[in-house]
């Protein structure tokens, strides 16, 4: 009885199992298909249920196909299983790495916050104020400028000292001084501050005989680099930067915006621009052999001597550390960090930033106004006019005068305009 009943039960149990299996497979496959609208129609039941357990980019190509044979199902499953396993393994690895990255970032932030920088800003105009607001959340900010901005600065949590009292400004024991004056007034401002800066460095009761890190943010780069190298005392390290954004483009935060920088001088050693840039990005305009350098070594400009950051002085390590702490502010704000030589910056900028300002000014001079039938293209044109003419004419003039590549851009633009008009005229002639 037992035997006969088991004979009867066995087939129905197996059938039941098959039905359950089929039902489950259809249910999972259908719900999977419903979640993936881009499916094609090639794979099997086990394929779709496998893919659901291990979703990957490929899973969107999977769908349920009732006509597939069992053999097909098994062989597909065998093929996909190792890939699915591998993806799971890689995902676990990815998760572990992002946990590690989060821990490192947390430690870095703690290190930065344990020693916040005291930052001086010279030039508290449109751009100086814009960066001061963000710097104030990373450290202490003291600003100075030609005009009186006492009340405005106070509202931002920034201390203000008039430019007419530079000794008081330097007495604030600044780690970093950011030069944010107009390009045209840059050299004069640096020269006027030199006596007070030298006096501060010479005073043995202040600053350990070392000067502050001097950073410029000018929209041209070779020009301030040369002035800072020529004029500043050796005790001052130099970082040349250009945040490729301003109060308009950066009004909703700095995330994803380009920040160009060149570590120019550390502890009296001028870094070779090209080998520095080659560490991280290919430099299209340089024709120098690749040098195998790690992040912590650098080549001295002129002599070609390779220096290691650990090599000799504490001043060297401190100087490097101070630069990294300042750069970290921009990193933490989400900027896309672009190490680039000042020379290459100016080549790129003439054909990107300067031409945008030039076109904005030319189109602005035409007095263009919105119309009731504006296209999206025309909207963009008006936006370019608005954003470029919001900057001072001093800034535009500086882009022209102090980037040796700008005149070339103007000449090419004029030639291109002539060429295009010429093409129109030719076509009109042949049209008659
Ligand atoms: P700007 O017109 O280029 O510069 C205005 C600043 O220069 C003000 O702080 C002004 O001081 C100072 N200044 C002008 N003439 C002076 C003089 N003779 N002596 C002393 N100081 C003088 O406008 P900005 O937009 O604020 O730009 C400042 C710097 O940031 C420029 O070098 C620019 O290239 C760079 N930058 C600007 C942007 C941007 O989007 N605007 C982006 C990146 C970099 P007072 O206000 O006290 O008169």
Image (cartoon, rainbow, N blue to C red):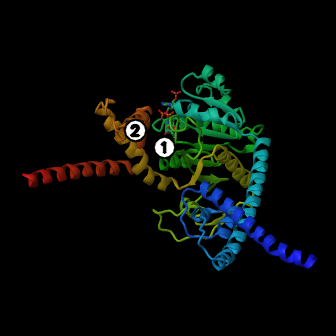
Image quadrant where one finds the N terminus? bottom right
- Seen from the viewer's position, the closer of residues 103 and 213 is 103
- Seen from the viewer's position, the closer of residues 25 and 428 is 25
Residue 177, image x, y percentages: 63, 39
At x 60%, y 53%, the residue is 263
Label 2 crowd (10 A; few <14 / some 14-19 / many >=20): some
Q: Residue furthest front?
A: 1
User: Is disc 2's CB within 8 Å of ligand 1?
Assistant: no
User: Is disc 1's CB within 8 Å of ligand 1?
Assistant: yes
Residue 340, image x, y percentages: 54, 55
At x 66%, y 41%, the residue is 176
Reading the image, the residue beneath label 2 is 384
Q: Give the distance between the C-alpha atoms of the residues marked 1 and 2, in whole angstroms.
A: 17 Å
Q: Residue furthest right?
A: 2
Check the image and report above or below for 58 versus 207: below
Residue 54, image x, y percentages: 70, 64
Image quarter of residue 360? top left
- Seen from the viewer's position, the closer of residues 146 and 385 is 385
Reading the image, the residue beneath label 1 is 219
Label 1 crowd (10 A; few <14 / some 14-19 / many >=20): many
- Seen from the viewer's position, the closer of residues 424 and 291 is 424
Q: Secondary structure at mark 2?
A: helix
Q: Nearer the viewer, mark 1 or mark 2?
A: 2
Q: Secondary structure at mark 1?
A: loop
Check the image and report above or below for 39 versus 106: below
């Amino acid at each position: 009885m037992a035997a006969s009943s088991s004979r009867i039960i066995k087939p129905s149990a197996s059938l039941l199992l098959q039905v359950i299996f089929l039902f489950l497979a259809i249910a999972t496959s259908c719900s999977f298909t419903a979640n993936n609208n881009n499916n094609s129609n090639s794979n099997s039941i086990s394929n779709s249920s496998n893919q659901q357990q291990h979703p990957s980019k490929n899973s969107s190509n999977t769908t349920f196909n009732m006509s597939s044979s069992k053999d097909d199902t098994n062989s597909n499953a065998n093929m996909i299983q190792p890939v699915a396993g591998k993806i799971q393994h890689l995902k676990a690895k990815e998760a572990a790495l992002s946990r590690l990255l989060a821990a490192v970032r947390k430690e870095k932030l703690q290190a930065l916050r344990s020693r916040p920088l005291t930052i001086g800003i010279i030039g508290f105009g449109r751009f100086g104020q814009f960066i001061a607001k963000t710097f104030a959340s990373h450290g202490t900010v003291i600003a100075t400028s030609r005009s009186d901005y006492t009340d405005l600065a106070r509202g931002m949590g920034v201390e203000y000292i008039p430019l007419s009292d530079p000794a008081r400004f330097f007495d604030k024991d600044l780690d970093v001084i950011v030069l944010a004056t107009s390009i045209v007034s840059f050299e004069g401002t640096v020269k006027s501050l030199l006596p007070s800066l030298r006096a501060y460095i010479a005073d043995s009761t202040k600053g350990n005989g070392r000067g502050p890190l001097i950073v410029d943010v000018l929209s041209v780069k070779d020009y301030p680099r040369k002035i800072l190298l020529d004029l500043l005392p050796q005790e001052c390290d130099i970082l040349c930067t250009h945040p490729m954004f301003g109060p308009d483009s950066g009004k909703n935060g700095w995330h994803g915006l380009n920040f160009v920088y060149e570590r120019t001088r550390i502890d009296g050693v001028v870094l070779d621009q090209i080998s520095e840039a080659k560490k991280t990005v290919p430099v299209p305009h340089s024709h120098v052999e690749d040098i195998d350098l790690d992040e912590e070594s650098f080549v001295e400009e002129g002599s070609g001597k390779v220096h290691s950051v650990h090599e000799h002085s504490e001043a060297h390590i401190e100087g490097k550390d101070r630069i990294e702490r300042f750069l970290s502010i921009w990193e933490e704000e989400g900027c896309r960090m672009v190490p680039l030589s000042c020379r290459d910056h100016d080549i790129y900028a003439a054909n990107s930033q300067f031409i945008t300002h030039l076109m904005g000014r030319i189109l602005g001079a035409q007095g263009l106004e919105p119309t009731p039938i504006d296209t999206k293209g025309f909207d963009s044109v008006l936006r370019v006019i608005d954003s470029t003419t919001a900057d001072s004419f001093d800034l535009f003039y500086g882009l022209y005068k102090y980037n040796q590549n700008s005149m070339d851009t103007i000449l090419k633009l004029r030639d291109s305009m002539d060429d295009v008009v010429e093409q129109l005229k030719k076509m009109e002639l042949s049209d008659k």
